[in-house]
Image (tube, rainbow, N blue to C red):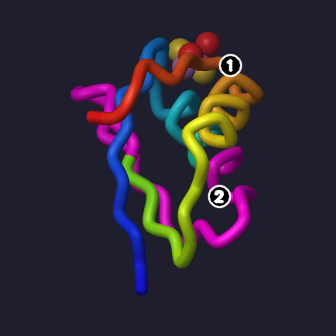
Amino acid sequence: TAYTTTYTVAGMTCQHCVRSVTEELARLPTVSDVAVDLAEGRVTLVSDGVVEDGAVREAVAEAGYELVGRA
Ligand code: 9UX
């Protein structure tokens, strides 16, 4: 079973931002795909397990951005 969850993320303004946040989120356990919609400030994760919001928040912060919430 795959989970697909979309979050709103603040602070991403360029393709380098997209790469940074994508690389950081891809490191989370069970995450198999990361898609960023830069214009909308949304990030979608596909994972084989439940990914806690706190883990997403930490990874987004590590990349330099802010998790706002679920979209
Ligand atoms: Mo360049 Mo995107 O500083 O923040 S990585 S705009």
Q: Quadrant of residue 14?
A: top left
Q: Magenta includes 29?
A: yes
Can you say which quadrant of the picture contains the C terminus? top left
Q: Is residue 35 above or below residue 70?
A: below
- Mark 1 falls on what kind of element? loop
Disc 2 secondary structure class: helix
Label 1 close to label 2 by CB (< 8 Å) = no
In this view, the residue in front, 42 or 19, is 42
Which residue in the structure is indicated by mark 2? 26
Q: Amino acid at mark 2?
A: Ala
How far across and down, in percent of the image, does residue 9 sit? Answer: 43, 25
Q: Residues within 10 Å of mark 1 (few under 14, many from 20)?
A: some
Magenta residues span 23-43
Q: Look at the numbered disc 1 and say if its residue's Cβ is closer than 8 Å to ligand 1.
A: yes
What is the three-letter code of the residue carrying label 1?
Answer: Gly
Which circle marks residue 39 in the picture? Answer: none
Residue that appears at 59% across and 67% down? 31
Q: For mark 1, what is the residue?
A: 64
Q: Is residue 20 magenta?
A: no
Which quarter shows the N terminus?
A: bottom left
Q: How many marks?
A: 2
Mark 2 CB lies closer than 8 A to ligand 1: no
| Earlier sequence position, callout 1 versus callout 2 | 2
Identify the residue at image location x=72%, y=31%: 58
Residue 23 placement (x, y as % from top left) = 67, 50
Instruction: Check disc 2: other Cα within 10 Å, few if <14, some if 14-19, many if 20+.
Output: some
Residue plotted at (44% across, 15% down): 10
**Direction from residue 5 to residue 40 in the image, left or right:** left
